[in-house]
Amino acid sequence: MTDNTKKWMPFYWGSYLKNTMHLRAEGHGAYVLLLGAAWMGDGTLPDDDEQLAAIARCDDKQWKRLRPTLAKFFQIGGGVWRQERLSYEL
């Protein structure tokens, strides 16, 4: 049986835009892909730059530039990245 609860994800545009208006398109794209991957998994992402860059569809140079900004949206520890609101919604 398929887990249908993960086919959709609530997305609160007001909260998202309030916190991300400083991002350029590249940052938004990477952040949304990271959120989607966390949602479809167990709510976490591996604290591994190679895997995170791949999820965000970034090359090494792009990821090194975006990582400090994107990391601010997550709690990082224990080898994983966790986004507070996403964890709550899951």
Image: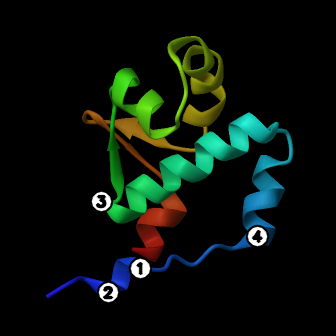
Q: For the residue marked with disc 3, what is the amino acid?
A: Gly
Going from the N terminus, do you reach mark 1 or mark 3 first? 1
Looking at the rendered structure, the secondary structure element under dot 4 is helix
- From this view, report whether residue 10 is shown above or below residue 72: below
Going from the N terminus, do you reach mark 1 or mark 4 first? 1
- From this view, report whether residue 85 is shown above or below residue 25: below
Going from the N terminus, do you reach mark 4 or mark 3 first? 4
Relative horizontal placement of residue 47, taking residue 27 as reference (left or right) = left
Please tell me the numbered disc located at residue 4: 2
Going from the N terminus, do you reach mark 4 or mark 2 first? 2
**Gap between marks 1 and 2, in whole Å?**
5 Å
Relative horizontal placement of residue 78, taking residue 35 as reference (left or right) = left
- From this view, report whether residue 49 is shown above or below residue 30: above
**Gap between marks 1 and 4, in whole Å?**
18 Å
Residue that carries the numbered disc 3 in the rendered image = 41
Where in the figure is residue 76, as x and y percent of width and height?
41, 36
- From this view, report whether residue 84 is shown above or below residue 25: below
Discs 1, 2 touching: Cβ within 8 Å: yes
Give the label, 4 or 2, closer to the camera.
2
Q: For the residue marked with disc 1, what is the amino acid?
A: Lys
Q: For the residue marked with disc 4, what is the amino acid?
A: Trp
Going from the N terminus, do you reach mark 2 or mark 3 first? 2
Report which quarter residue 73 is drawn in. top right
Residue that carries the numbered disc 4 in the rendered image = 13
Looking at the rendered structure, the secondary structure element under dot 3 is loop
Please tell me the numbered disc located at residue 7: 1
